Every structure is written in structure tokens, then in C-alpha cells.
């Protein structure tokens, strides 16, 4: 498990890089008919006594938590291009949830509720998870049961965030950029030599791939695949040039934090607006299992 000081350090490094990219104003599109809105809704469970503890997903064994280390949020951005030249406006929603994984049925229900309330077509909503391993189980996976009472609250709260962002639409400008970060991105899964197979969860020596084999290990052939080092950033500002929201993508896995926690995604999202000195919604989606993960602001 990564220390909290290291977790905060990484979050601040990533936020600084993201804000630097945003400040470069690469490929900036000034406000024409573009409108944007952003919102965040708290989805932290009530798990302290006398409430039952949360069932936590993320390990190969079921976890429990009866305290909150830091809050969980669902964050949403809504964009509307204003239409033009005889065509109707296109409106989309980008949503990030502090969760390890969510089933398609839960996401579809959230989209259905949001579409009924604000009119954005379901097929123009994208909902993703940060992949924190310290959140309640929104689905049954990895040897963990579903935290049913908690999961039942998520569709309505995700819809609330989309509707709130839609209600806050205002004239905006948008810019984007990217940068490669080879220093922090590595493939954690390596292919082992046939004679050094590891045991599978059933105790059989079938494992030809393993995570974190050790520095210069002689038991492995090489990484199981390439690494995506790119940190891509979408920066949204009001017509007056004030930060409104940032959305980014970065292939970095979770690092480990006491449950309940958003892991490094939360500090990353909280630190970005503080660094800019202006209120803004920062959002962070998540991880590809073969790499050390993914995040977005």
C-alpha cells in the first residue's frame, strides 16, 4: 500500500501537469455556441455504527469498512455545441464515479433517469469509474458480494449529477492537449518463464503472468504488453476565462488507501482547483488492469 504522503505527492504532480497543459491552451475553441456545465454529488456511504459496515470491493477477498477516510463523489460535465448551419445542437454528458466497477444495468438505469429528467439522449452519456479499490461494492466481483443497499442509491445520485451539470450550462470555451509521462507509467504484469509458473487462486501452478515480479527478476521474460504514457487533458472555461472544469485521462492504477476512500483520484481532483486558485470541477476516470492504471480529472 502506498503511503498517504506519496499518494498526495503523485496526485499533486499529476494535477500540476494537467493544469500546465490546460494553461497552454492547445487547440482552443472559443465560445461560439458552445455551452458547458459541471457538477459534483456526494456518494459517500453512511457506514458508521449503528449503520452496517460497507462491503468493499477491490481485493480477492471481501473487505469491510465502518469508517470514511475521505469522501466519494460522482462528477459530471455537460457540453452543448449550440448547433448551427441548419442542424440541431448536440448535447453530451461525461460522468466519473468514485467506484471500483459498476455493472451495465446500474449505469443504464442512471442514464435512463437522467434522460427522463434533462433530455440528454442515453447514447450521448459516458459514465466511467475511477477504479478506486476502497469504495463499496457496486457490483459483485473478485470474490466480493454486492453491497446492495449502497448500489441501489447510485443510479439516482449519478442522474442527479448529470441533471445538475445540465442545469448549469453557460457559454464556454474549450481547449485540449497531451503530454507523455514515462516516469510514472509502467506495466505491472510480466510474463514468467515456463519453469517459474506461479500458483493460481485454486493452488495449481498454472500462472504464466504475474504482477510486480521484483527488480531485475530472473523469473520473467518481459512485460505482458506496452504502456500508454499519455496524460490527455480537456480544459473548459467560462466565457470570461475562469476555470469551469477539467477532464483528463491517464493510465495509472489505484495505489491503495484505507476504505472508504477515493484513493489518489480524490486528492487529484480536489487539488487541481486549489492549484488554479479558482473554483472548478476536476474529474478523474480509471484503470486498465494490465497497466498501473488509469485516471481522469
Image: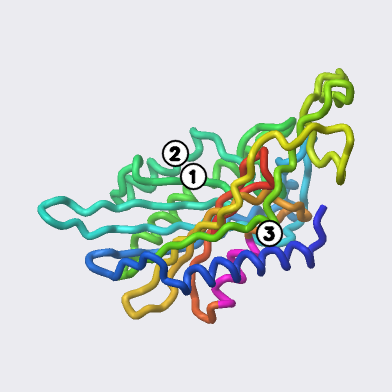
Query: Are the two marked residues, 2 and 1, in contact with CB atoms closer than 8 angstroms?
Result: yes
Disc 3 marks which residue? Answer: 264
Disc 2 marks which residue? Answer: 109
Is tag 2's residue or tag 3's residue first in the polypeptide sequence? 2
Instruction: Indicate the position of residue 234 as horizontal and vertical percent values.
Output: 44, 61
Give the foreground label among 1 and 3.
3
Instruction: Indicate the position of residue 114 as horizontal and vertical percent values.
Output: 38, 48
Is tag 1's residue or tag 3's residue first in the polypeptide sequence? 1
Q: Magenta residues?
A: 266-275
Q: Residues within 10 Å of mark 3 (few under 14, many from 20)?
A: many
Picture quarter containing residue 76?
bottom left
Instruction: Indicate the position of residue 275 as horizontal and vertical percent values.
Output: 58, 77
**Mark 2 to mark 3 CA distance (whole Å):** 28 Å
Residue 99: tell me if it is visible: no
Check residue 142 for magenta coloring.
Answer: no
Residue at 65% in and 51% down: 252
Disc 1 marks which residue? Answer: 155
Amino acid at each position: 500500500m502506498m503511503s498517504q504522503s506519496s499518494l498526495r505527492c503523485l496526485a499533486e504532480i499529476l494535477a500540476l501537469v494537467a493544469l500546465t497543459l490546460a494553461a497552454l491552451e492547445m487547440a482552443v475553441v472559443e465560445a461560439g455556441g458552445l455551452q458547458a456545465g459541471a457538477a459534483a454529488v456526494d456518494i459517500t456511504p453512511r457506514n458508521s455504527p449503528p449503520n452496517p459496515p460497507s462491503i468493499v470491493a477491490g481485493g480477492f477477498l471481501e473487505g469491510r469498512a465502518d469508517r470514511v477516510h475521505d469522501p466519494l463523489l460522482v462528477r459530471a460535465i455537460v457540453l452543448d455545441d449550440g448547433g448551427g448551419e441548419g442542424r440541431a445542437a448536440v448535447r453530451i454528458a461525461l460522468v466519473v464515479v468514485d467506484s471500483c466497477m459498476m455493472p451495465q444495468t446500474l449505469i443504464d438505469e442512471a442514464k435512463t433517469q437522467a434522460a427522463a429528467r434533462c433530455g440528454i439522449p442515453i447514447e450521448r452519456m459516458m459514465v466511467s469509474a475511477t477504479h478506486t479499490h476502497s469504495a463499496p461494492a457496486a457490483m459483485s466481483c473478485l470474490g466480493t458480494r454486492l453491497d446492495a443497499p449502497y448500489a441501489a442509491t447510485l443510479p439516482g445520485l449519478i442522474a442527479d449529477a448529470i441533471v445538475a451539470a445540465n442545469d448549469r450550462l453557460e457559454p464556454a470555451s474549450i481547449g485540449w492537449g497531451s503530454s507523455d509521462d514515462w516516469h510514472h507509467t509502467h506495466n505491472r504484469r510480466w510474463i514468467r518463464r515456463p519453469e517459474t509458473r506461479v500458483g493460481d487462486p485454486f493452488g495449481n501452478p498454472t500462472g504464466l503472468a504475474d504482477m510486480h515480479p521484483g527488480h531485475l527478476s530472473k523469473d520473467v521474460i518481459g512485460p505482458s504488453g506496452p504502456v500508454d504514457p499519455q496524460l490527455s487533458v480537456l480544459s473548459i472555461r467560462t466565457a470570461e476565462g475562469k476555470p469551469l472544469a477539467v477532464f483528463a485521462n491517464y493510465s495509472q492504477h489505484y495505489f491503495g488507501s484505507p476504505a472508504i476512500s477515493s484513493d489518489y483520484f480524490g486528492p487529484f481532483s480536489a487539488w487541481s482547483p486549489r492549484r488554479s486558485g479558482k473554483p472548478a470541477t476536476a474529474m478523474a476516470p480509471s484503470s486498465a488492469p494490465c497497466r498501473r492504471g488509469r485516471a481522469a480529472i
